[in-house]
Amino acid sequence: MGNPPIRWAPPALVLSLLLGACANPGPAKPVASNSARPAPVEAYKLTNRLTWGANLAAVDQAESHGLPDYLAQQLHPQAAVLPPSVQQQIAAMTISQRPLDQLAPDMEQRNKAANATFDKDEDKKTAQQAYQQEMNRLAREAATRHLLRALYSPNQVQEQMTWFWLNHFNVHMYKANLRAMVGDYEDTALRPYALGKFRDLLGAVAHHPAMLRYLDNEQNAANRINENYARELMELHTLGVGAGYTQQDVQEMARVLTGVGVNLGSETPKVRKELQADYVRQGLFEFNPNRHDYGAKTLLGQPIKARGLAELDEALDRLARHPATAHFISRKLAQYWLSDTPPPALVERMAQSFLRSDGDIAVTLQTLLSSSEYAQGAGQKFKDPIHYVVSAVRLAYDDKPILNVGPMLTWLNRMGQPLYGRQTPDGYALDTAAWSSPGQMATRFEIAKAIGSGNAGLFKTEGPQPMEQPAFPQLATALYYRAVAQTLGPNTQTALAQATSPQEWNSFLLSSPELMHR
């Protein structure tokens, strides 16, 4: 007989859900617990916020360890162990097998060859298309790896913070050859420091060719100053707007950054004899003292001693440990994890933790995530597209690895939040207004329908298909009855009761206001 026909929601019911999806559904009533083992609904609410989206595996772990221990494990994670099939997917990627200092120069040579003179224009066009396709494939590998880790890594806070810093220190993959660099940028400059010291993270970003190329610092030289990176380093990465720095400070920071750039070639530049000791080459990163302004500098009212690349370390120390940076980073973290307008008192406590711990990100997050404000804030934060997409797939398929993240990448593109796709250095917005338009909501309903009906294509691969294709997901699970159902409001419960098939019921649940928030 096959599955019953899939019927989408009646227009009135869709409209009712749509109008409620952006609104805060309100916190669920607290559930009393007389033991160290949390009630299922408590574990569900916490994991739904700490992870990319609650699933049975995360809730079971939080229940068995207790909420304080679970939080501690997330803030201080061990090395992640991914499901074997997921790890195999990642290990087979070019970006996993070839280091950036081999991959990027090779792609640079391919680009030069593609742009060389050909006897026929058609041959040149074919070579250029092949180059662009390979660059797109490398960027797609990076995005695929990011989503697979978000879905299946046990270190969910680390994965959320990797995305947070990727957005904070934004680069755009379609500038120059960044499509070949974004995977390494995320994997070596961001993820290892995502829960560490902010100063180490800031330094790793400042030494990565993706950032230096994106913000044009390789063009920054003595007597030919380019302020792009210096400006964003102060305005977006550390101090924030209104922190009291001046245009003169931006100019001085740009002078500090002269000579800091990228070298994709195999040759070392000819450095003046008296400056040769100052030359630095680390992978594709290069400090060329011939291009550096060695004049006296003053940054934020204090002198910078002229000594080549070490000037950058001194400047980054000053920026990372400034009270304005502590407040700027703390507020942005609270906005990401709690609400669009976080309580000022909480932000202040976080900033003090940041300063006392010398910018320890995990310590700052501990202040936030263990606060009473956070405990009372379940359901306040509206999910941006990536949180909605990843959380829906995690809930639908738990720890069963999907075989194709292509539909997820397509959904993120449709909703305007593709990985590495933000052109401007400010990153994607973190507030509700940016992601709650009627068009956005309509797309989310389509995604809910595709996942809920099993027609999303998440298990379709290239070539021969597996003998057994999973049917539509079963969302009316023990987890639903133990925890999820207790967080749903009357309107959602009414809508679920009117569903005429399991697939439609899935779609209603995934598009409910409660599942649009975390």
Image (cartoon, rainbow, N blue to C red):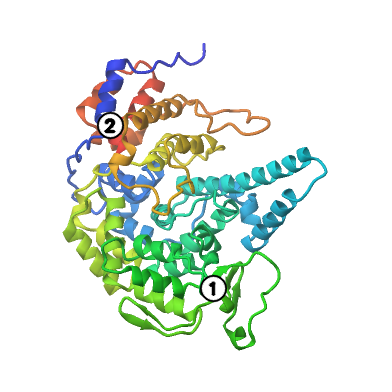
- Residue 154 visible from this viewpoint: yes
Rendered location of residue 104, percent (x, y): 64, 58
Discs 1/2, front: 1
Q: How many marks?
A: 2
Question: In screen coordinates, is 237 left or right of 493?
Answer: right
Quadrant assignment for the C terminus? top left
Rendered location of residue 467, percent (x, y): 63, 28
- Residue 382 visible from this viewpoint: no
Marker disc for residue 274: none
Mark 1 and mark 2: Cα distance apart in space: 51 Å
Q: Nearer the viewer, residue 67 or 454?
A: 454
Q: Between disc 1 and disc 2, whose residue precedes?
A: 2
Question: Quarter of the image holding residue 515?
Answer: top left
Q: Is residue 244 above or below residue 512?
A: below
Residue at the (61%, 74%) spot, across then down? 281
Q: Amino acid at mark 2?
A: Ala
Q: Amino acid at mark 1?
A: Gly
Residue at the (51%, 65%) spot, across then down? 217
Q: Which residue is mark 2?
A: 21
* Label 2 element class: helix
- Badge 1 crowding class, 10 Å Cα cut-off, few under 14, some 14 to 19, many 20 or more, is many
Q: Which residue is mark 1?
A: 259
